[in-house]
Image (cartoon, coloured by chain):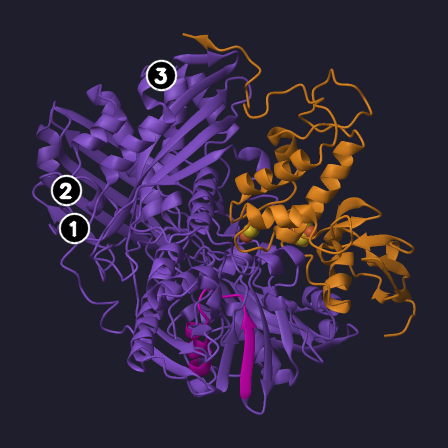
Chain colours: A purple, B orange
Amino acid sequence: MPDTVKALGAPTERREGPDKVTGTARYAAEYRPDGCAYAWPVPAGIARGKVTAVDDTAALSVPGVIKVLSHLNAPRLAEPDDATLAVLQDERVPHRGWYVALVVADTLEAAREGAGAVRIDYAEEDHDVTLRTDHPDAYVPEDKDGTSGEHVRGDAEAAFESAPVHVDVEYHVPPLHNHPMEPHAATAQWQDGQLTVHDSSQGATTVRDVLAALFDLPADRVTVVSEHVGGGFGSKGTPRPHVVLAAMAAHVTGRPVKLALPRRQLPAVVGHRSPTVHRLRLAAQDDATLLSVIHEVTGYTSRIKEFVETGAAATRVMYPSPHARTTHRVVPLDVPSPSWMRAPGEAPGMYALESAMDELAVELGVDPVHLRLRNDTDTEPDSAKPFSSRHLAECLEEGARRFGWAERDARPRSRVHGSVLVGSGVAAATYPVNASPSQAVAHAFPDGSYVVRVNATDIGTGARTVLAQVAADALGVPVERVRTEIGSSDLPAAPLAGGSSGTASWGWAVHEACARLAERLTRSGGKELPPEGISARADTAGTADADSDYARHAFGAHFAEVGVDTVTGEVRVRRLLGVYAAGRILNARTARSQFVGGIVMGLGMALTEGSTMDPAFGDFTESDLAGYHVPAHADVPVIEAHWIDEEDPHLNPMGSKGIGEIGIVGTAAAIGNAVYHATGVRLRELPLTPDRVLTALDAGA
Amino acid sequence: MGTDVFHSEVPMTVNGSGHSPVVDHRSTLLDVLREQMDLTGAKKGCDHGQCGACTVLVDGRRVNSCLVLAVSLEGCAITTVEGLRDADGEGLHPLQRAFIERDAFQCGYCTPGQLCSAVGALAEAEAGHPSHVTGPDTAADAPVRLTKEEIRERLSGNLCRCGAYPHIVEAVEDVTRAEPVGQDRSGQDADGTHGTQDEVDA
Ligand code: FES
Ligand code: FES
């Protein structure tokens, strides 16, 4: 089957490309059903307390305003599993920005003016939003899936004390915001008891199930469509309040309702990355082998929902040591609920671990690439399971070769370009291999064309394209003959685009359905198909989520070169390079874009992105794109992403690992380590903004 | 909707054809395009002039359409991403083709803004407008050659959270290479951020 070889791995152009460059691809807020009204939410103006009165008189007198909803008159919902979805259900205000009212109007302008005219009275209570490692309420969360809680191996403290070489350092990562370019939005419509919602979501099947439960409907009375989604990075992974509000407003007004969240409101209601404080203690023998690793992470969670930024999870995977302790602690505060943001846990955790490894290399007087190679392993340190494949060493070696690492003068401050100090740094990357059960249907038509149906979501990964490639591969036909239908909950149920598991999960089901269809076609021995064609179905429950005897993770290595301006304190990245071992790469073109995109977000984490929880107001100081600086064109140099061919028979039928998140893991550490190499000064709090860099340079000089 | 003290009819040309929408005086061009004219190519990323997703061309110049009141545009010619065409007026604009070839997007939400912004930036360079990175000793009023550094600088008002920047720059560069817009007057090295300074080894 020669076509098979061509389909998977080929750099096929993304199928929706023409729609996206001509503006015809429609996102959730771009549907205009007849009679569509507009909603605008009202966020709480206090950090903690209760709503005591809602005065909607002025709002209702704004021409065009139809309705003002609050907990006093909103429909009652069934209690959700996720407390952030219990919107307008009671008078409680758990954090600033929590929605307390919703205005519905004939036009966007009227809805917005109406929202500004709603008067809310509160009974304010004292709040506490400040994360401290010695907070009396800090606790070790339950370890539900192996990534949280506390894991202990040997006697980590005693071994640390007895070792000849140690580092004991603290790293700080601020709150970070996902800020996908498309703000969260939904257009909802009820017709004859049937709810249809266009939602900006990473997984419409879950949104459908959650809405059905909240509004007490059978699932088949709800359809959720997420055809094109303008990024999510975790913040659209599960339903967010906007979709519940839109459905509620449409129900109450009897009109279709469109709700697109204003950018400034996102940080308080769609989740964010919890800030984390990392204390890292690494101890090594003189020969650079690790003896003890202690990684303690403290983050916060909200009062209404526990979320743990599992910063020490990757430390359980990376380097062997006879003694280790990895501990998570969370402090419940009066803050917005944190949630997933690209590589939750791994991104901040590997920033801290890989920075500390760099410090250890300096203490030992060894090359940082060498230190990592010296501490490579075939066995996952924490679980003692063999890795299904681990080509970290190859990534480091290939990266070092391509980057020209051998020519690097190891001494800090060894390259001076006028007022600019130039340095380079390295960090490793890892991300777990995840997959969840999915269903899919493959259908063959008499004219030799095929369609695969699965409720996958394309948040920018190119899911339509890569699933066609998977199908073509399994059917043994050219990819042009296969259509994909995705992005609607009426299609076979599928898990979300998240955890770098979308392609693995959907592809697995598509592969199985197509393999079955191919078998049926073979059995029919070339007989004419019935006019409607024939179908095969697959459900990977029990297969995709089966336990494995292997520890399955992707690995990678990041290399960075920076210039640090000693006059302005500005850090500019000159070069970035990533090399990955992530199983089989299914589409070289779209995969490269995902890797590069992850690296760019890592660059932002290192240099520009940071939010502040204001202690007095309980609010994020940097909530929109003017205050919260995501990297812009001028920040981003040439970025190289490479991968090594990795055969791993213990994954899914495609042999792929996830690629959506590993690019952000370790990038910030590589950049921070490069800043140290450039300047000889170690900064341990992100982002490395000019004020911090100048202060550190002055102190270090 | 009729005209009254809060609403006016505003004759304008949109993508080559005449329209006279009646607009709320508070409405931005972006909202009129998206909500009244069903031209949803221009995107709303921030509604505050911070992201560039809403970039369109007004009389050939790029603007953030979320910052322009529609009522101020009487007689103006608006071009949105839906109106971009190649020189024959038939197929995709060369930038649109280059974006597909270079995979210069992922989610696509910033893409219409990047495209309109790039069209505007090419015209500005052609007309000799300098940018922050254009060298001081270059001739005035001659076209500026768009190096990678120039492209990055001139497109920095268009954020891409998917991080497609390197591919966007390559796509724009492909188009400038295919249709040379003039000689280099940037006086700068194409890539090095600090490349013009002498390297001194300590
Ligand atoms: S929507 Fe206009 S600049 Fe962001
Ligand atoms: S392609 Fe998603 S924001 Fe640019």
Mark 2 and mark 1: span between their CA atoms?
Answer: 8 Å
Tell me if residue A205 is in the magenta stretch: yes
Task: Please tell me the numbered disc located at residue A151.
Answer: 1
User: In this orientation, which residue lies closer to the viewer: A88 or A631?
Assistant: A631
Q: Are marks 2 and 1 on the same chain?
A: yes
Q: Mark 3 sits on what residue?
A: A412
State the extent of the magenta-drawn residues as a range.
A194-213
Q: What kind of residue is marked 3?
A: Pro
Determine the secondary structure under disc 3: loop
* x 73%, y 18%: residue: B136
On the question of residue A262 being in view, the answer is no
Determine the secondary structure under disc 1: strand
Question: Disc 2: which chain?
Answer: A
Q: What kind of residue is marked 1?
A: His
Do callouts 3 and 1 mark residues in contact (Cβ within 8 Å)?
no
Q: Are marks 3 and 2 on the same chain?
A: yes
Mark 3 and mark 2: span between their CA atoms?
Answer: 30 Å
Q: Is mark 1 within 8 Å of ligand 2?
A: no
Q: Which of the two discs, 3 and 2, sits closer to the camera?
A: 3
Q: Position of residue A137 (x, y in %)?
A: 30, 54
Task: Please tell me the numbered disc located at residue A435.
Answer: none
Q: Mark 2 sits on what residue?
A: A324
The number of numbered badges drawn on the structure is: 3
On the rendered structure, is A98 left or right of A432?
right
Quarter of the image for residue A113 reads bottom right
Do callouts 3 and 2 mark residues in contact (Cβ within 8 Å)?
no
Tell me if residue A445 is in the magenta stretch: no
- First in sequence: mark 3 or mark 1? 1
On the rendered structure, is A165 left or right of B116?
left
